[in-house]
Structures are given as C-alpha cells and as structure tokens.
C-alpha cells in the first residue's frame, strides 16, 4: 500500500507535469501547389521558416490531402490555386484555401491565428517586392505589440503545472484514503467493536484521520522538494504560508472523506462517490482549463470546489510570491469550509452509528 | 474396508521455499466420521486442508479424497465435497433464497432440485419469515447455520468446516453441533478444524498438529488416557509445550 | 452454461442492489458530458484584463472599445500607474494589462508607428500566450481598417475552412475523451473491485472449492460490466446528439464494435489489477491513482500529444485510451471507415490479448 500512496503519486508528478501543455506546436502542414510559381514557393517557404509548423507534405491533389487529414497525418492544408501569381499581379488580390482540422476547436483557433500572421507577413513583403513606386503615396501605419510575460518569461508550462498536479495528488490521496477508511471498518465489522469501547467518538475520528493529515503533509513536502530539484520551479512566497494553508486545506478534504464514509455501506460505494466528486473538482479547478472562460453559473459552482482554492493559493504563493493578505480571502473561505465539512461529518457520524 | 476410507493421506508434504508448512502427515478418515483437525495458529492445519479440498497442490506425498487423487483429479474432488470457511461466506447483499439458489446453481443442481432443496432447507432452519430478506440483516448465528446448510446443498460425501463456530455464543455453538451430528448420521463425513477444545470432545476422533506434524491421533477418550489429562485442553497444552 | 447463467444473475443482483454505486455509474457520464458541453472549455472567453493608458486619446479609446467588445476579454479595471500592475496580479483576478504608450495617436500619425505592451500574468502560460495572440489579432484587424484607404497593396486573403467541427465547439473535442475515460475507469475499477471484494469477504475461496471453473468465475464477473459499459456508451452518444447536436458521422456499427473492443481491454486490465491486489483498497488505489491522471493527461483527451516532449509521446503509446480516442474521433467526427483506423484497432486488440494473457498467468500463480 505504501508504494501506492507515495511512489505512484510522486512518479506521476515527475512525469505528467511534462504532459500538460496547450501550446500548439509541431503543426503538421500539408500543401497543394497548383501554380508552381516563384510567388507560391515563396509563400510556402514562409511557412517552412516558421517554428510552429512541421512535416510539410506536398500533395498533388485535394483528394489526397483530404485523405491524409482523415488519417490524421496532417493538421492543416494550404491550397494554392492555379495562376496564383498571374492573377495576383493582375487583380492585386488573390485567395488561398486554408483547411484546418478543427476537432480541437481551441487549437484550430490558434492555428488560424498563426497562419493569418504568416500570410500578413507575406503581404508586407509583397508590398515591397511588387508594389510600384507610384502607389506609394502614403505610408501604411503599424501598431506594434510587445508581449511581456511576467512571473514566467519563457512560458515554461512545467512551472505552471507542477504546483497544480501536486495539489491534485495531495487531494486525491487524502480523500480516497479517508473516504475508504471508516467504511472499511464498517464493512469488515470492526466498527461495532470500537463503538462498544469507552473511546469518545471525537477521539476516534481524530485518531483515524490524523495519519492521513500527516500523509498529506508528507506528500506536500516530498512534492515540493521534487518540484525544486527536478523542475526548478520558483518558490517566491513563504513556505510557512504554504504549509499553514495546506494544513487547513487537508482538513476540508478529510471532512469530505469522512462525510462520504458515513453515508456509505461499502468501500466500493465510498470510492465511487469520492471518484465522482474528484473528477468534477479536478475538471472545474482551473488546473487544466481557465475558470474565467466558464459561464457565470459554472463559475458560481466552482466557489464550492476546494481544489480550486488550493490550486489558486499554491500558484499565487509559489509563482507570484503573494503574501498573507493576498490569500486571506481564500484562506477564510477554506477555513469556513473546513469547519462546515467537519461539523457535518461528526454530526452525521453520531447519527448513523 | 478400503471403500469406507473417504480420506486417505500418506506422507503429505507442502513446502514454501525453505519453510515446511506440512511435514509428511498421514491419516485416514472413515465414512460418516466426525474428524477433528486441531492445532495452534500456524501449525499448518489450514494449509493441509487446502490441499485436501483441491485449491493447493501438495509438494509430495499421496492423498485421496472421496476416492479421487488430489494431484490428478482435483476437479472431481470439488464436485464431491462441501466447504465452509472460517470467514463467513454467503453474500450479504443477496437474500436467503437467492444465496441458496446461487450456490445450488454453481454445484450444477437442476432448477427442480434447487426448488426442493431450498424449501426443505428453509423449513429445517425455520427461516420462512426471512427467506426474502438480505442475508446481511440476519444475526451471525443464523448466518452460520445457513452457511453450513448451503455447503451441504449438493449432498457431498465429505464436508470440510474451517473453524466454523468462531465468534458465536455457546447456545448457537451447541445448536450448530447438533446440525453437524445430524449430517454425520445421514452418512456425510465431517472434517472440522477448531481451536475450541471443548468442541474437540464432540468429535469421533481428533488429530493434533504441532509445527507441521501430526503429534497425536485418536478418540478424545483415548487421548485423555494417553496423556493423563482431565480434558482435551490439557492434552493440547501438554503437546504444544512439547 | 446453466451454472454460468446463475452466476451472471448473481452479479446483476450485486450491481442493482447497490443503488448508490449504480447512481454514480450512470450519473457520472451524464454529469461529465454536461459539464464539458456547457461549462468547461479550453478556449479563452471573458478574460479579465486591465488597461494602463498613458495616452488617453481618441485612438486608444477606440482600441479599448474594440477589445472590450470582443468575447475574449472583459475590461476589469483602468489603472493609472505601472506600480499597480504588480498589486493586481498578486490578487490573481486580472490576467493581463494592456499598456498604451504616451502620445499614441500622435506617434501613429507622425511616425506611422505606435506601440502597445501586453503584460500577461504568465503563471498560466496557456492563457498568457493565447491572450497575447488574440490581442495581436484584434490590433491587426484594426490596423488593416485604418490602412484601407491608404494602401492598395497586393494582398493574399486566406479563405479558411474549419473541417470536422466548423463551429469550433469544444464539446466535439471532449466527447470522445469523456467516453474513453468513463468506459476505461468504470470497467477497470468495477471489475478489479468486485473480484477483490470476493477475495476479501472470503467468498472467492468458496467459489474456488466449488466445481465452477476459475475462468467462469472471472467471465461471470466481467460480463455484467460489458453490458453496463455499453449502456453508458449509448447514453453518451445520445446525449451528445440531442443536447449538442453532435452527429456520429461514421458507421454506428463500427463504433459499437470498437467500443466493445475497448471495454474488453479495460475489463482485462481490471482483472489484471485484481490479480495483483489482495484488498479492495489496494485495487481501488491502483485503478484510481494509477489510471486516472495518466489517462486524462497522456491520452490526448485535453492536451495535444504532439506538443509533449518526445519521451512522453513515446510513453503515450502504451496507454490504450490514446488509441481509442483516435478511433472515436475518426468514426464520430471525421466519419472514416475501418480502412483508416485498422492500425489503431489492431494495437488495441494486441493490448487486450496481452492483458488477458498476463492475468491468466498471474491468476494461475496465485492459485498454486
């Protein structure tokens, strides 16, 4: 059991933190050049020069390109029509076809932005290369944008994911263990024996849950060490603050676990219910997808998601160096949550046994 | 004569690596006998029993159960024996009737046989009122009686009972032994492990295992004489201390 | 065969008596599909941004209005000095600050050039990068409008066609993933739990002593879950059709066959887990902790596999879910036939055979 509690999560932290990136890279690019002109080749070269695109297959026909897209061999197709160069010179404007595999809508949006940028860039050159002097009456204006990425200049995704995945692992382990624990005694029948001993119920509960609290804190410690040593994740804020928050946060999770345990008869039920909530908590935590993009009702639902708070606090404290006052509102909510959950858990425990 | 020996064991041995769990034991059990298989925890009695019921292959030696060789005909043995484990082993989330039907089914009884058997069984145990309640809701003593009856559902030649009376009160234990006698009178051989020494007195013959060997084997009366002991408990203590 | 039928009947009793598990079993896919359809998206919408406008002229106002009007951004705050940026970032709500330089309009007219700084909170690099891209796109469009009268330059206009998902609905992307996760976890977890449960309660021993064959025991345990998983798959397909108007483009028959193949491979994985765990607790921790995150992260469900570092791309090949997601996307969204996905199908089949073989081997060792 011990390897499952410690080794499995930490191994996942090390491996999976590398997996979570939305960065759209290595776009598999296919093209159909019906013109074979200087202009068409120049346009394709622009794409080849970009770091976002890969592969570059030349398809003789549209049908072959579609087939390759069906097989998943390419993500986008650029279709350059016949007489592309001639018409461009004559009409001063021409069209190219762009087909994007849009199953992943968000990635397709980003791919579209990249493609548009490259073509615009090409247009600028066209102006220089083809434009006649007489046209140059007025100069085009340009609005330049300078992106600055604070706290994470190189857009390192691991910096972002490591604290989040650590949060998940701490939450999952403590929830599953505490959710299963008391119901296990119920199922095996030892709970009855304990209920006839003079031990107070609160003592019993604390005695049962304390080890899981320790395990959670231990996981956090090892996880933070790994984050520092392997991923060199910045830790700008105070460690004390992180531990203080975590110690309260784990109480929330243990409360939920205990509550589930009280309302179930078998370990299987307990695990199923815990699983149900964990999946929803994870998906709505802002860990993988931004919370701001959710509709208002869904954002309201996330207010009841403890994992959301923990993800937020860890990222704020570790990566931005937020202080006590910055996280105070979150801390208060978490504390209230802990009190309510544990209150409910103890109350329901007394009622059911 | 041979025909009446339903269990014949000679030099049966089971080793796990360097550890010899069962060390060349030999004994015979006759038809209709109640055979007590005693020993302290870890003496090897569960391992020995597992070889006899065909879920563990012996390292060496010979054993025939219900006329079949444990090495070559384990599947035939399974059809001719019943088994009740020390863990209570009916399904809590099935009703009394559903449990009977299920176990009848896996022993290959026909639908008609199952119907007759379950009616008989429920009547004998006086479970009419709870026939359609979940087994999980029954008191432990009832569950054990039911479990025993279910292990006899296919009229096995031998029934193996692994510490069947753990955790029940003396009255329920008494009633349980009455059921064992009844089964033995019908000709079923009963092979029972227990660590209650008073129960050993109810057996026709008992064997006592110490560290993988059978150190004593006879009727309770003769054993008491042999070891000059007042009861079986003293016999056991004398043996265990060496 | 008669024995076997009784056995399956008993398994169904177990499942239907446990109302809470049953509720989760069927509630889970519904909840997830609805969440992904209505709540969760990996797009950027309504991101809170702040403006720091050193110029405050007609042009910057127009740009700010354009940005505020876009569905991507909502302007949360107008700040007055650079020092405020740090403070609002630390509070965590505002994700980016747009800074307009002094004399923006003037520069634009005089120098034909003006600068906007996009300062993004890059603790979330995904969002930061996308914000930067989208602001860029809005500014480009604005710039082109301004230039319309001025230039008559040659230009190439891309005509973009979004295929397989023209409206860019993110639910299209998530449905195959949700279906995979549900089928995988339900099948693997339920079988591993229900087998170890019999071990823990001692009934497994009774079954082994009975004449019923071990493989019949396992088959009997697994069979009801094939049935339940198929119902789950049907519910998911129907929900996505009726609520999100997501038609299955390819053959329903093929979709059914592939689903059964994947379910069987997950069940085999569940059996394998049960052979290596002695208690329900261990089985659950292995199937939940060991399967959940790798399946979510490495299968291409949310994150594109092609963007992962090479070692992870290689590891992702051993995740059956990855192959099933490719198959599902092919059949459901692209409408392809078996000739396009036979390779993935074969890999999945091979994995299934491997899991079954390994669990038979492990199971035999345990019996000794």
Image (cartoon, coloured by chain):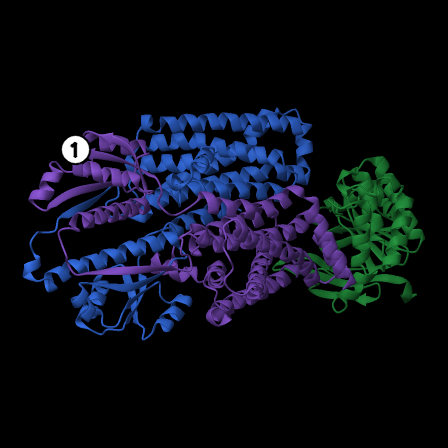
Chain colours: A blue, B green, C purple
Q: Viewed as shown, does residue A158 lie left or right of C277?
A: left
For residue C196, above or below residue A326: below
Which sits in the foreground, B52 or B236? B52
For residue A314, above or below residue C301: above
Which sits in the foreground, B167 or C285? C285
Residue A184 is situated, as x and y percent measured from the top left of the image, at 62, 40
The residue at 50%/34% (across/down) is A253
Which sits in the foreground, A48 or C68? C68
For residue C360, above or below residue B180: below
Q: Where, by quadrant of the figure, is residue A130 drawn?
A: bottom left
| Residue A203 visible, this orientation | no
Quadrant including the C terminus of chain C? bottom right
| Residue C264 visible, this orientation | yes
- Label 1 is found on which chain of the structure? C
For residue C334, above or below residue A214: below
Which sits in the foreground, B10 or C250? C250
Task: Give the secondary structure at mark 1.
Answer: loop
Which residue position is annotated with label 1? C56
Residue B145 is situated, as x and y percent measured from the top left of the image, at 84, 44
């Amino acid at each position: 059991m011990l390897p499952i509690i410690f080794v499995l999560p930490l191994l996942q932290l090390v491996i999976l933190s590398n997996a979570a990136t939305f960065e759209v890279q290595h776009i598999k690019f296919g093209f159909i050049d019906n013109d074979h002109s200087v202009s068409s080749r120049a346009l394709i070269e622009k794409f080849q020069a970009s770091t976002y695109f890969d592969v570059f297959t030349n398809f003789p026909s549209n049908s072959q390109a579609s087939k390759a897209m069906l097989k998943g061999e390419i993500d986008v197709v650029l279709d350059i029509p016949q007489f592309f160069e001639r018409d461009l010179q004559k009409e001063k404007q021409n069209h190219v076809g762009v087909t994007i595999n849009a199953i992943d809508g968000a990635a397709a949006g980003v791919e579209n932005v990249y493609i548009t940028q490259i073509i615009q860039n090409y247009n600028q050159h066209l102006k220089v290369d083809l434009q006649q002097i007489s046209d140059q009456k007025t100069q085009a204006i340009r609005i330049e944008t300078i992106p600055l990425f604070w706290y994470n200049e190189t857009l390192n995704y691991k910096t972002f994911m490591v604290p989040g995945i650590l949060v998940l692992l701490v939450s999952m382990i403590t929830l599953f263990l505490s959710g299963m624990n008391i119901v296990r005694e119920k199922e095996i029948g030892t709970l009855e024996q304990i209920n006839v001993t003079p031990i107070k119920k609160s003592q019993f509960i604390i005695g049962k849950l304390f080890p899981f609290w320790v395990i959670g804190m231990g996981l956090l410690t090892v996880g933070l060490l790994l984050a520092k040593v392997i991923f060199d994740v910045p830790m700008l804020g105070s460690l004390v603050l992180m531990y203080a928050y975590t110690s309260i946060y784990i109480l929330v999770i243990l409360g939920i676990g205990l509550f589930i345990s009280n309302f179930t008869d078998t370990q299987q039920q307990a695990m199923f219910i815990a699983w149900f909530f964990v999946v929803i908590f994870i998906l709505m935590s802002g860990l993988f997808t931004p919370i701001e993009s959710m509709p208002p009702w869904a954002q309201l639902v996330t207010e009841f998601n403890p994992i959301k708070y923990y993800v937020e606090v860890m990222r704020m404290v570790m990566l931005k160096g937020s202080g006590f006052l910055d996280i105070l509102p979150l801390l208060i909510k978490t504390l209230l949550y802990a009190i309510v959950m544990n209150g409910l858990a103890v109350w329901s425990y007394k009622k059911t046994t | 004569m041979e025909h009446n020996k339903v269990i014949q064991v000679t030099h049966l041995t089971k080793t796990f690596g360097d550890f010899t769990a069962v060390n060349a034991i030999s004994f015979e059990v006759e038809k209709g006998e109640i055979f007590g298989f005693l020993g302290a925890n870890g003496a090897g009695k569960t391992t020995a029993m597992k070889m006899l019921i065909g879920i563990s292959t012996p390292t060496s030696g010979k054993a025939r159960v219900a006329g079949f060789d444990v090495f070559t005909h384990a599947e035939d043995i399974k059809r001719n024996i019943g088994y009740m484990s020390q863990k209570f082993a009916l399904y809590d989330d099935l009703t009394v009737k559903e449990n009977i039907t299920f176990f009848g089914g896996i022993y290959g009884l026909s639908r008609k046989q199952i119907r007759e058997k379950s009616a008989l069984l429920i009547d004998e145990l006086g479970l009419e009122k709870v026939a359609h309640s979940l087994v999980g809701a029954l008191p432990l003593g009832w569950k054990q009686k039911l479990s025993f009856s279910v292990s006899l559902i296919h009229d096995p030649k031998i029934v193996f009972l692994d510490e069947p009376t753990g955790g029940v009160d003396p009255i329920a234990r008494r009633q349980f032994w009455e059921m064992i006698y009844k089964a033995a009178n019908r000709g079923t051989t009963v092979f029972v492990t227990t660590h209650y020494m008073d129960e050993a007195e109810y057996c026709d013959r008992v064997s006592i295992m110490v560290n993988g060997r059978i150190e004593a084997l006879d009727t309770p009366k003769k054993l008491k004489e042999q070891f000059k002991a007042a009861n079986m408990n003293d016999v056991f203590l004398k043996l265990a201390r060496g | 065969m008669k024995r076997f039928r009784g056995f399956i009947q008993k398994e169904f009793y177990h499942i239907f008596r446990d109302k809470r598990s049953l509720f989760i079993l069927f509630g889970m896919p519904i909840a997830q599909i609805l969440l992904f359809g209505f709540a969760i998206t990996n797009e950027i919408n309504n991101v809170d941004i702040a403006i720091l406008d050193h110029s405050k002229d007609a042009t910057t106002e127009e740009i700010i209005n354009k940005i505020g009007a876009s569905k991507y951004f909502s302007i949360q705050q107008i700040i007055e000095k650079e020092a405020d940026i740090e403070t609002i970032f630390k509070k965590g709500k505002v994700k980016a600050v747009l800074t307009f330089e002094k004399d923006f309009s003037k520069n634009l007219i005089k120098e034909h050039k003006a600068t906007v700084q996009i300062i993004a909170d890059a603790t979330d690099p995904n969002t930061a990068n996308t914000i930067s891209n989208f602001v860029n796109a809005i500014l480009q469009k604005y710039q082109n409008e301004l230039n319309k009268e001025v230039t008559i330059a040659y230009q190439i206009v891309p005509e973009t066609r979004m295929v397989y998902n023209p409206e860019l609905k993110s639910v299209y992307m998530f449905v195959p993933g949700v279906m995979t996760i549900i089928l995988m976890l339900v099948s693997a977890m339920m079988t591993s739990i229900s087998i170890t449960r019999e071990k823990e309660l001692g009934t497994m021993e009774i079954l082994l002593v009975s004449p019923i064959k071990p493989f019949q025991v396992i088959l009997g345990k697994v069979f009801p879950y094939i049935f339940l998983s198929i119902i789950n798959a049907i519910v998911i397909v129907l929900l996505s059709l009726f609520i999100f108007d997501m038609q299955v483009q390819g053959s329903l028959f093929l979709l059914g066959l592939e689903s059964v193949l994947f379910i069987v491979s997950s069940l085999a994985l569940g059996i394998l887990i049960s052979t290596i765990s002695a208690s329900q607790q261990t089985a659950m921790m292995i199937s939940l902790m060991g399967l959940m995150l790798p399946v979510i992260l490495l299968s291409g469900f949310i994150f594109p596999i092609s963007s992962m570092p090479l070692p992870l791309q290689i590891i992702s090949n051993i995740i059956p879910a990855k192959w099933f997601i490719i198959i599902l996307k092919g059949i459901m969204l692209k409408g392809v036939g078996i000739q396009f996905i036979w390779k993935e199908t074969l890999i999945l089949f091979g994995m299934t055979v491997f899991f079954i073989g390994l669990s038979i081997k492990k199971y035999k060792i345990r019996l000794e």
